[in-house]
Image (cartoon, helix red, strand yellow):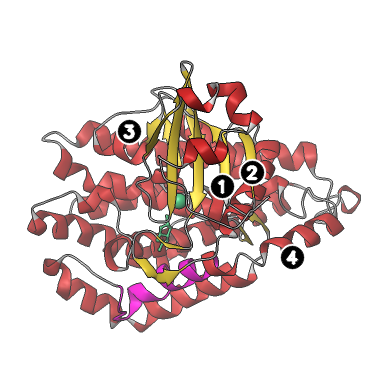
């Protein structure tokens, strides 16, 4: 069989995948399929294949960054890492990620469950829609994946082998290393920002303490191989109905700090918060809700992490025979929180200053207003980078967001 990689199109997909049991069993024979390409992310092709009243998703990596084009090649192996990460996340937080139906390494494609009527969370937040149980689900997801992928839980040899496997996800880590920790803090070719932000951007880039702090976070990212992180946990990687939350897209999976995913997620909730005044006349209620999501996500993370600490600690770290008590857990939580705040600050910066911006701000057509809201976000990010020791908990984080929103 010729398994040379070839990008799918809606026209070629039925012929090429028509023999797969994983599809036929869900959507019938290829003759009845309707195929639509719906990918709106930065990297991949995403097809919905419909047939017999059901649907599945076919996601295929392209050999380049879709957002930029073939001038920026990107290895197809990211589909392999996404598949590996999905399998682990499904075991660590059952039901939270889409079910994988088929994986083809050579074609860099994953056939998976079609989430319906779920839509991307970022769009919901911009539209002012709330999701019941969002904070609880995401706090638990972050805690379970952080804990169960770490030396607190895994057998040491298994964890080291897994960390070695994911070390090869070099190109995706490189994107994060450049776009999140480095480019925002200098004049990089791929950067862009709202013109009216120029003075704030100049001031941020002139601030040596900020640059130093961002590099310290980069060192945590590259050297803190604590657990298998999702790696790109923003509100575009979450799909929801009004009452259900699912996590998608772990192709940036890597072994990193336990606070990484939590920090990225909080940044995206905070950017939804700061951008609300542009999306509705009375933003207050939605903003209150978003800050409650921030605090409740952290509360759910802490509660679940503490439960796992008490009930599932079976790895080489903090073994029961050493008799660790609450102080050890508090120390670990403080370490995770400190990292999370630093990563949060970097993510808040890069979405306004680097290559891949987010729709929360980008869809604001009045650039003067956009710049005012982005400025609040950037200033808060700066404070998180250089003075995160003064943000002891999630309530203080929410309070800080309110202060910056009032400026
Ligand atoms: C070139 S890729 C840009 C961004 O898109 C992905 O979703 C990640 O967030 C990455 O940083
Ligand atoms: Mg993605």
Asked whether the viewer can see residue 274, the reply is yes
Q: Which is closer to the viewer, label 3 or label 1?
A: 1
The residue singled out by tag 4 in the image is 164
Location of residue 185 (image quadrant): bottom left
The residue singled out by tag 3 in the image is 289
Label total for image: 4
Which residue is the extreme one toward the right?
321
In this picture, which residue range is highlighted in magenta?
173-190
* x, y percent for residue 345: 39, 62
* x, y percent for residue 260: 54, 57
- The crowding category of the residue bearing disc 3, from other C-alpha atoms within 10 Å (few below 14, some 14 to 19, many at least 20), is some
Q: Earlier in the sequence, mark 2 or mark 1?
A: 2
Q: Which is closer to the viewer, label 4 or label 3?
A: 4
The residue singled out by tag 1 in the image is 109
Q: Earlier in the sequence, mark 1 or mark 4?
A: 1
Rendered view: 355 above or below 261 = below
- The crowding category of the residue bearing disc 2, from other C-alpha atoms within 10 Å (few below 14, some 14 to 19, many at least 20), is some
Q: Is residue 65 left or right of residue 108?
A: left
Which dot marks residue 251? none
The residue singled out by tag 2 in the image is 103
């Amino acid at each position: 069989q010729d398994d040379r990689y070839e990008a799918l199109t809606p026209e070629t997909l039925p012929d090429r995948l028509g023999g797969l049991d994983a599809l036929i069993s869900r959507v019938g024979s290829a003759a009845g399929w309707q195929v639509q390409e719906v990918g709106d992310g930065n990297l991949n092709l995403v097809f919905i294949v419909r047939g017999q009243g059901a649907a599945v998703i076919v996601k295929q990596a392209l050999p380049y960054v879709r957002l930029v084009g073939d001038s920026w090649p990107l290895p197809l192996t990211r589909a392999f890492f996404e598949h590996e990460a999905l399998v682990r996340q499904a075991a660590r937080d059952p039901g939270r990620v889409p079910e994988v139906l088929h994986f083809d390494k050579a074609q860099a494609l994953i056939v998976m469950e079609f989430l319906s009527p779920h839509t991307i969370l970022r769009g919901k937040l911009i539209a002012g829609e709330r999701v019941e149980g969002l904070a609880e689900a995401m706090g638990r997801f972050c805690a379970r994946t952080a804990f169960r992928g770490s030396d607190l839980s895994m057998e040491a040899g298994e964890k080291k082998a897994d960390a070695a496997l994911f070390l090869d996800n070099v190109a995706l880590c490189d994107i994060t290393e450049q776009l999140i920790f480095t480019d925002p803090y200098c004049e990089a070719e791929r950067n862009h920002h709202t013109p009216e932000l120029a003075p704030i951007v100049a001031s941020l880039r002139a601030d040596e303490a900020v640059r130093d702090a961002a590099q310290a976070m980069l060192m945590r990212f590259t050297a803190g191989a604590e657990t298998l992180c999702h790696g790109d946990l923003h509100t575009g990687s979450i799909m929801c109905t009004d009452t259900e939350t699912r996590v998608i897209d772990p192709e940036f999976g890597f072994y990193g700090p336990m606070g990484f995913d939590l920090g990225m997620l909080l940044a995206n909730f905070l950017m939804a918060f700061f951008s609300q005044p542009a999306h509705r006349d009375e933003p207050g209620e939605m903003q209150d809700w978003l800050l409650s999501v921030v605090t409740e996500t952290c509360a759910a993370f802490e509660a679940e992490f503490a439960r796992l600490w008490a009930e599932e600690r079976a790895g080489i770290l903090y073994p029961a025979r050493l008799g660790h008590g609450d102080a050890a857990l508090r120390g670990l939580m403080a370490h995770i929180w400190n990292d999370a705040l630093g990563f949060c600050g970097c993510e808040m910066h890069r979405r306004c200053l680097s290559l891949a911006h987010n729709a929360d701000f980008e869809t604001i057509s009045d650039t003067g207003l956009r710049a005012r809201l982005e400025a609040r976000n950037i200033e808060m990010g700066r404070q998180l980078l250089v003075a995160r020791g003064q943000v002891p908990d999630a309530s203080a984080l929410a309070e800080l967001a309110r202060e910056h929103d009032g400026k």
